[in-house]
Image (spheres, rainbow, N blue to C red):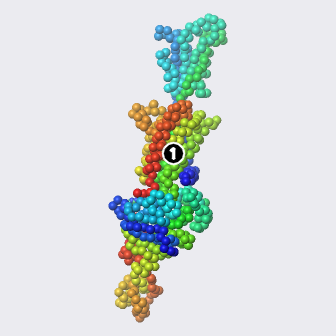
Amino acid sequence: MGSEPVIEVDSLVKRYGDLTAVDNISFKVQRGEVFAFCGPNGAGKTTTVEVLECLRVPTSGSAKVLGLDISKRSDLHAIRSRIGVLPQQFNTFELLTVKESLEFFGSVFDKHVDPDELIKVIDMAEYADMLYKNLSGGLKQRVGVAIALVNDPEIVFLDEPTTGLDPKARRGVWDVITNLKKNGKTVFLTTHYMDEVEALADNVNVILNGKIVAEGSPRRLISKYGGQQTLVVEEGQVEAYNVLKGILSDVVMEPNGDVLVKINSKSDIANAFSALDENNVVYGRFSVKGASFDDVFLNLTGKKLVEGELR
Amino acid sequence: MMRFPGLVKVFLKHWYRRKSTIFWTILFPILLITIFGSIFSNMGQSKVGLYVQNLDVKDGQPSQMSQGLISALNSTEAFQITLVNSTQNLDDILNRASNPRAIIIHEGFGQEVATSLHSREASPVSLTLKRDMTQVADPAPGIINTVVRQFNTYLLVNSTREVVTVKEEAGKSGFRYIDFFIPGVIGMTVMTAGLMGAVSINTEYRMNGVLRKLATTPLSKIDWVLGVVIYEIIIAFVSAGIIVGLGYLPFSIFDVHASLNLPAVLLIFAGTLAFPGMGMILARFVRDPTAADAAANAIAFPMMFLSGTFFPIDMYPDFLKPIANILPLTYLNNGLRAAMVNNQPDVAFANAALVMVIAIISICAGILLTNWREK
Ligand SMILES: Nc1ncnc2c1ncn2[C@@H]1O[C@H](COP(=O)(O)OP(=O)(O)OP(=O)(O)O)[C@@H](O)[C@H]1O
Ligand SMILES: [Mg+2]
């Protein structure tokens, strides 16, 4: 992954009347990376990607996609020919089969990939002749990804590709995305799932109320914003709670009886372990949990992000 | 590069995979024809209408001979006789009549019959029967000939010589409801397919996000509008072809030899351009799909009734006539009638030109108002 930016956004603003959906953001996406745009509902993710896909006209600021200017009419055709898009809440023609849909979308581009090959990419050979409307949600999303690939695009935009899918279907979509990266595609992914960011993204921008509040690799953001590690005393109950409360400051008990302790140094762990031992406290497992991307969000906003909503 | 043919193919696939569209574009018009055709073809069949113009009049008094003949016709009780006097223009009356049939008793009829009775060599005196010769099953000539034969027997007592004879003449082709209705049904199908089809395609695909997906590809909004319109044109010709074709089948439910000639084709073409354009304008302003469908219905149904689809506009109350005159379907219907059954190509072409102007305006507006990129 070199330093060849394929997307450059500079001071982008998009207003809908009085509402500023995207508030003066700038960022770059490098060729070949999976770039995640992460934020709660209404943060401005879709607005941003749709500006880059030339579906919306920005209020001010500029953006270049593959070196082409999204505000220039003469560049639109070239941009559309070289990008692939999975819109949020994607749908294609209900009464076409998977293969027919791929053939149709292929016919719209000057150059296109063989439908059978795409069906292999999304691993749906046995569904090739099934009508789109009869597919499950996860398979529909995979068809959407395949359609986004019909023109062998350099950049693939995936707007919330796994929202509303069950865990198994999400894994299926993740596998497809991982393969895209292997094949050298640049992927622009929006999501409000933290595990998705951790599993897939090389770089992530956290967007909140139209502003980018954090950027970097997930690992870097976790170490910067993830906060302390947590000691977990499973099923420690009140006994463990009372013992640990005596020696450490930040102790909470979960409703299921697990006792969680924020730790500041290695000696905290040793002290906790011996205190429990000395007092003959009975408990399940004793473990240390590293910070996750969830904590990044919690520390940035003071709230948890659950199914796109800040709680 | 033209990208719309692929879209047309996609729409056609949806058309035949979705049973409801087949119903509305093909079965529904045929159903209407069957129902309306059978209701109105039996109407007023109990008595046969007959105009009688008695020109054998002297000093305002019809001759005895002509009077005798008329009462003989009357006594059969088969005819609903309307007397036409010598100052009225019989051809005008027949042109407007729904059953154009007339007996003309010419001037000097009574005198000629009297002369003929006394001379054995005299040729028979003729009566003229004007009627629509295309009506094969017309009972009138048979009844009239029987009456005339009895009239001869009565005059001559014991002879079989013919004194009076009936000479048939072709009048203007009669007005048959089904002739009127078939072009109307085609006009109606073109209108509903175009207006409702375009509205439902546009709102459905906008709501489910397919339009947004298409907008991210090199497909332009002109491709989109052309795709919709060309699809509607194909559907309109398929249903018009089926309706016209059914009229030619020997065992057909209706027998109308309508012709799908050049002006008719132009009219169907122009109509199918005009109505999707309107549909797209409507879809642009009414964004919710159910509301848009309702609005399309609210426009399509009154237009259907007010544009002379089912009944001639002449029969409408006066206050409705100006409304009919501003509805595009009126011109489509009038044009199709002129082209397909009345054989008046000039009238047909004039209406086709007018519908084409409406089509061009509405298609341009449709293209301009379709938003591909959100502002
Ligand atoms: N066409 C529009 N007109 C007016 N307001 C809009 C429009 N599109 C989006 N918005 C508003 O702009 C804000 C940002 O919306 P956007 O769809 O970009 O958010 P998002 O991050 O994609 O959210 P989600 O996770 O729900 O998809 C929201 O408050 C939304 O209501
Ligand atoms: Mg969104």
Q: Is residue B79 visible?
A: no
Up/down of A311 relative to B177, above or below: below
Q: Secondary structure at mark 1?
A: helix
Q: Quadrant of residue B112?
A: top right
Where is mark 1, residue-wise?
B193
Depth order, front residue of A92/A225: A225
- Foreground residue, B124 or A4? A4
Residue visible at 61% across and 15% down in the picture: B165
Name of the residue lying farthest toward the top: B118
Quarter-of-image position of residue A220: bottom left
Residue B44 location (% of width, % of height): 52, 28
Horizontal side of residue B362 vs B45, given as left or right: left
Q: Where is residue A167 drawn, in percent x and y?
A: 51, 71
Q: Amino acid at mark 1?
A: Ala
Residue A233 visible in image: yes
How far across and down, in percent of the image, does residue A148 sit? 53, 63
